[in-house]
Amino acid sequence: METITLQKPDSQFLRDVRERSGQEPSNCYQCGNCTAGCPYNFAYDIPVSRIMRLLQLGRRDEILQCKSLWLCATCQSCTTRCPNGIDVARIVDVLRHMAREAGYATERNVKAFGDAFLESVEKHGRVFEVGVVAGYVRKTGRFWTDIELGPKMLPKGKLGLRPHSIQGAEHIARIFRRYRGEPEPAATTGGETK
Amino acid sequence: MTLTIGYYPGCSGAGTSVEYDQSTRAVCARLGVTLRDVPDWSCCGSTPAHTVNHVLSAALSARNLELAAQAGLEVVTTPCPSCLANLRIAGHKMEQPAFRDDVRALLETECETLAETKSTLQVMVEEVGLDEVQARVTKPLAGLRVACYYGCIMNRPPEVMQFDDPEHPMAMDNLLTACGAEVVPFPLKVECCGAAAGMPRKDIVAELSGRLLDTAAGLGVDAIATACPLCQMNLDLRQGQANAARGTRHAIPVFYFTQLMGLAMGLSAREVGLSKLVVNPKPCLERAGLL
Amino acid sequence: MRIGVFVCHCGSNIAATVDCPSVAEAAKLFPDVVFATDTMYACSEPGQDGIIQAIKEHRLDGCVVASCSPRMHEPTFRRALERAGLNRYMLEMANIREHVSWIGKNKELNTGKATELVRIAAEKLRLNTPLFANQFDVTKRVLVIGGGVAGIQAALDCADAGIQVIMVERETSIGGKMAKLDKTFPTVDCSSCILGPKMVDVAQHPNITLYAASEVEEISGYVGNFDVKVRRKATYVNWASCTGCGLCMEKCPSKKSHDAFNEGVATTTAINIPFPQAIPKKAAINPEFCMKLQKGKCGVCAKVCPTKCIDFEQQDTIVSEKVGAIVAATGYDLFDWTVYGQYGAGRYPDVVTSLQYERMMNASGPTSGHIQRPSDGREPKRVVFIQCVGSRDKSVNRPYCSGFCCMYTAKQAVLTKDHIPDSDSYVFYMDIRSPGKGYDEFTRRAQEQYGVQYVRGRVSMVYPKGDVLVVRGADTLAGTQVEVEADLVVLAVGVEASKGAAHLAEKLRISYDQYGFFMESHPKLKPVETNTAGVYLAGCSQGPKDIPTSVGQGSAAAAKVLTLFAKDKLESDPQVSSVNQNRCVGCLKCTMTCPFGAIKDVKDRAGNTKAEVIETVCQGCGICTVTCPHGAIQLQHFTDNQILAEVNALCQPELEF
Ligand SMILES: Cc1cc2nc3c(=O)[nH]c(=O)nc-3n(C[C@H](O)[C@H](O)[C@H](O)COP(=O)(O)OP(=O)(O)OC[C@H]3O[C@@H](n4cnc5c(N)ncnc54)[C@H](O)[C@@H]3O)c2cc1C
Ligand code: SF4
Ligand code: SF4
Ligand code: SF4
Ligand code: SF4
């Protein structure tokens, strides 16, 4: 295994995480309780308590490239039971944001699903489930792996085939555009400048 | 009883969990609770939004809380814990002025007043009350052995959710006991079912939901009661996948707790949307003399 | 007045950031200062000799020593003044270390501040007058509160030295937690075999009066002369005639009473003697469970008692005792672990506490030493121990380490193997804390010889599966989650201050920390003293500690008591309030405000009401002096004029250098 050089922690990274999560990573004393309770641990490449340790060591790239960040379901088990009151799930959430910003997506399909979901929200104001599936298939290039579920759902009317858009759909779309910092199309903003 | 309360069905209420929406409305009507839909409500952003950015997530949620408040609804109830978590966390975090300003910038609205959010489960227990529920029971669920499964985020983190015990919630247990069911002490009440991993990583859901199904089966239950569309889908629709992945042969019906309440209050199978369930609930209901 | 000023370098502690020679130089300009110098170590022998020599040479009347905190060396310099023939109260100290050099980096500013502090001290000194202590008698009897092993040791040591001891124990028997233990680490010797004889000694010692089932009601007075009221709680049994035969226990029909001694592992009878070796061996009725006291029906014990000592009408009584010193040894209680929902919060019968487990292993315990699962009586084959439950856990407001649970867990794991040779034990721990003599070897032996599986990580949850418990934890050394099935789970529950400790501390007027543990006077140098003269500490009442340390502290507290009692008379501190009878108008506002009841009202010759301070009771807090509308009551050594002189000194315009 690689030797970690302790003298050169990425302290900027540590500061960013601290600021964005509002949590103090050095409060972690490595008891492992978060890992102990994490339901997803079996699927993780780095257990969550080790992510906390690597964070203390400022190991940015190692953390942002790990798969665990994408698999965490924010189930709050770690947060609820951390003896030091660290909101661990929040830290993981923030690390995932940072991984996204850095262009990592080590669980491509998870990212694709999230993206497809949000695209649907942006378009209709609400989620259109069939649309999410379609978007997901398009992004991953994979045929819908849950195809066997279709026959179970379709006859029950659980998959609405037509999206229902809301009146405020444009408002939602604007939220997304502003979030991305995109300029408003002149026609809709009525001359607003940013 | 007369109670009017805002209602946020959540996107799945119009799709994969229509029966939750349907049975919630029916039970509320029976109990004299008037649900007023948040006008022109939009998606809360669910898990994908907060995994991308907290401000975006809060903005998507806050839009609804503001619309509700503008419509004069102080409290909004939602059956879905995922919506609940997003809406509550948005409200919670927007108590910090800096964060609120960031959200306002995305929303282009003032966010003067925001409605408070409570789960439908909480409303049933705290606003309606067990006595009132019990008084409405006409067909007690006697003979139905049920495990109540709350999912991971109905009560966690406790500082935000402020309802019931985060490790050992009892609200649903008490409600269904009031409806006459035999509720077993289910030890994995708050263990995660696999949540939204279903589509990208169904192996994870098979494992996690599989454990829950095994444990429930070990307790000899007739059915599982849930309060979450995602949990219900993972346990019910994906029960076959879990069986296939783990070599088990479970056929445990997975109800929404509101469906069971409805049945106990004499609502018909159609009124609570039983036909939408994937694992056939008929045999267990017939065995218990409820159909 | 002729004043000398001594500015100490404290090596480089002060001199590094304060220009000591120029402070001394500046001091020479202050009124009445006839001599000023800087010195390397004022407290050292040459330093003190220098002070004495200067006093003699320059015929000084008083000295200012600018050095460390008076808490550190005021007694030292006072003695030096006395050796030079001055009154000890002609000393003033300026704290230029803690208040200056250690907290400021700027040498120029520091030097200025140090100079001002010296000026303040010199101005006050100009108004100092010699003060003389009064002498008073000492009551050579000691009160020991709490009859655990620490209190027992303190009591026996004092009693053996010929001192009368009053021991007050809340429970119906002494012995404390140690009486409940099976074996003790690291030698694994039988707890009651080593404690039992000491308990008997307490009962039989002619110098010890034991009040069991009693609590301290009220304490007044001061070192050497405390007045103590003890509440002897109703036991509904006349102890003078109870022989401890136990017939009542055999016949009492209320058999489901809570068994506190057995930590609730079993139940007992409403009237009971907690355990066969109890001291005193007397029966007592638990009124909560007695049918006669609850419903008026029964009275069986009264009928069977051969000495007719049952008395359902018995009331609490108060006895008064005079003592000269007090040892507080009230021990600890266990953290209420049921806040941990993830461990079942008490719902699973086979999750027990460490102390319950001691009772289960104890040959004289309710299961006669057979380890059985509370749920079905089966012998467990897989026992999981979880350490740090309610310790080192900020989320439950218990951030501290309970000190001895690592060791007793190792002991319990070893004993489990002895009791059930074909069993497996697992210990979840965060760190193994075993710094005592032979302790680490012991925990190694548990792993190497007894095959106990130590797993480094906390446990996230315990849940039932069929009739076993699944324990899910982490092994941070293996780097992942682990799961183990257990027949029995033992929680090493953390230590907290004994119930009511804070309340008792207030009665004793001693400090306690935020968790209710009593505060020692100095964490290193005065570990068994408190800030109230004559009150000493021993055992876990001060913080978690094991038996050897508790016993050591018991003896240490006894030594302090004996040192105090070695003198026939004690000197009172003259820094107390005194009333100028001419100015006093007899309004008695001071009497009402004094928290120690140290001011009484008297009549002067003309029959007018006047206030008078009882010197031995006054603690010198000074509250009365600010209450008196006429300035008639003044605290010696801190008079209004002295304090105003200090203020004036500080508010002067800058001196030119
Ligand atoms: C499960 C377990 C196993 C242990 N095993 C070992 C071991 O093997 N070896 C070892 O060295 N240590 C062991 N210990 C630690 C040991 O119990 C303590 O070191 C020891 O009991 C401390 O003695 P103490 O006298 O200070 O306190 P305690 O034993 O708590 O005694 C205090 C006494 O004061 C009484 N009291 C409390 N408040 C009042 C009041 N207000 N008025 C009057 N009386 C009062 C109490 O009733 C009690 O009798 C173990 C502890 C536990 C929990
Ligand atoms: S539970 Fe908390 S303290 Fe323990 S390892 Fe995880 S983050 Fe660190
Ligand atoms: S929130 Fe994420 S990291 Fe924490 S326990 Fe749940 S899945 Fe694991
Ligand atoms: S009177 Fe009370 S203590 Fe005596 S035998 Fe009856 S129940 Fe027991
Ligand atoms: S002694 Fe050991 S078990 Fe007890 S609190 Fe300290 S570290 Fe934890």
Image (cartoon, coloured by chain):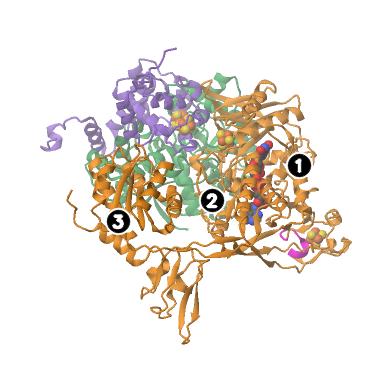
Chain colours: A purple, B green, C orange
Which label's residue is closer to the chain start, 3 or 2? Answer: 3
Residue at horizontal 75 percent and vertical 52 percent from the top: C202
Disc 3 versus disc 2: distance between alpha carbons?
38 Å
Q: In the image, is residue A115 part of the stretch drawn in magenta?
A: no
Which disc number belongs to residue C192?
Answer: 1
- Spot occupied by residue C618 in the image (x, y as percentages of width and height): 49, 66
Identify the residue position indicated by label 3 in the image: C120
Instruction: Give C52 or C325, whichever is nearer the viewer.
Output: C52
**Visible residue check, residue B140:** no
Q: Quadrant of the N terminus of chain C?
A: bottom left
The vertical placement of C279 against C549, above or below, is below
Residue at horizontal 40 percent and vertical 49 percent from the top: C52
Which label's residue is closer to the chain start, 1 or 2? Answer: 1
Q: Label 3 amino acid?
A: Ile
- Spot occupied by residue B76 in the image (x, y as percentages of width and height): 38, 48
Instruction: Give B10 or C228, whichever is nearer the viewer.
Output: C228
Q: Label 1 amino acid?
A: Ser
Left or right of residue B21, residue B212 in this image: right
Left or right of residue B127, residue C414 in this image: right
Q: Quadrant of ligand 4?
A: bottom right
Residue C167 placement: quadrant:
bottom right
**Visible residue check, residue B44:** yes
Which label's residue is closer to the chain start, 3 or 1? Answer: 3
Disc 1 versus disc 2: distance between alpha carbons?
29 Å
Between marks 3 and 2 in the image, the one whose residue lies nearer the viewer: 3
The boundaries of the magenta stretch are C287-294
Task: Tell me the SS state at disc 3.
Answer: helix
